Image (tube, grey):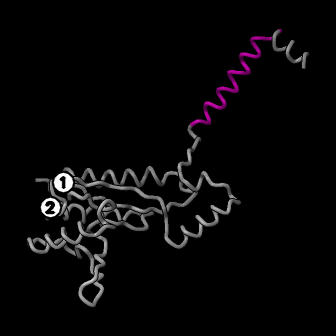
Amino acid sequence: MKRINLWLVDHPLAVAVGVLLVTAFFLFQIPKLVIDTSAEGLMLEKDPGKAYYDLVKKKFGSDNLTIVLLKSDDVFGVGALQALKRLSDAIERIDGVSRVESLTSVSNIKGEKDTLNTEPLVGAAVPTDREALERIRRDALSNAIFVGNIVSRDGKAAAINVYTESQAADRDFNARFVAKVEALIRAEATCRPWRA
């Protein structure tokens, strides 16, 4: 070891060149660096918790969640609901999206007399009559599952919860997905001024 130390002291130029070469090698590897921010990436392969996580994921689907937020003076207005429906439907068609939850895509599960009503909250088309819009508002804001998850308590914000399934080998999925969603949001904001 003493010999190596003496050689390093006697040849400072060679040592500096060697350090620069090693640094340059690692510098060129930076673009290949990928940061895994998933919860799954933090789990040990043989951990019993990971086995349970995989089982739950298999039963209930992906836990990769993206939230798109729509703000308006009244998200239950015709224009806001139509924008929410257009965005929800367009996002659902993106490759890799497993499901979308928004005011325009959820079922309105509620008891009515002796029956259980499971009809969609909004339906295939956004209604324009005041009575139907008030029913949507009333049902959404009285549902403890909807409030705080897909609509704010004051009715001024609505969320589109987007669940995605990406393949492990597809490292560019998130960037492509985000670009497509942002393009849809920009198109909706510029082409369809629904805020009043």
Q: Nearer the viewer, residue 129 or 172?
A: 129
Label drawn at residue 72: 1
Quarter location, residue 18: top right
Residue furthest to the left in view is 130
Q: Are marks 2 and 1 in contact (CB under 8 Å)?
A: yes
Quarter location, residue 110: bottom left
Residue furthest to the front in view is 113
The answer to whether residue 126 is left or right of residue 97 is left
Dominant secondary structure, magenta: helix
Q: Nearer the viewer, residue 74 or 10?
A: 74
How many discs appear?
Answer: 2
Amino acid residing under circle 2: Gly
Q: Residues within 10 Å of mark 1 (few under 14, many from 20)?
A: some
x, y (%) of residue 132?
Answer: 13, 74
Part of the protein shown in magenta? 10-30
x, y (%) of residue 144?
Answer: 31, 67
Q: Is residue 21 magenta?
A: yes
Q: Nearer the viewer, residue 140 or 76?
A: 140
Q: Residue at x 11, y 71 (%)?
A: 128
Q: Which residue is mark 2?
A: 79
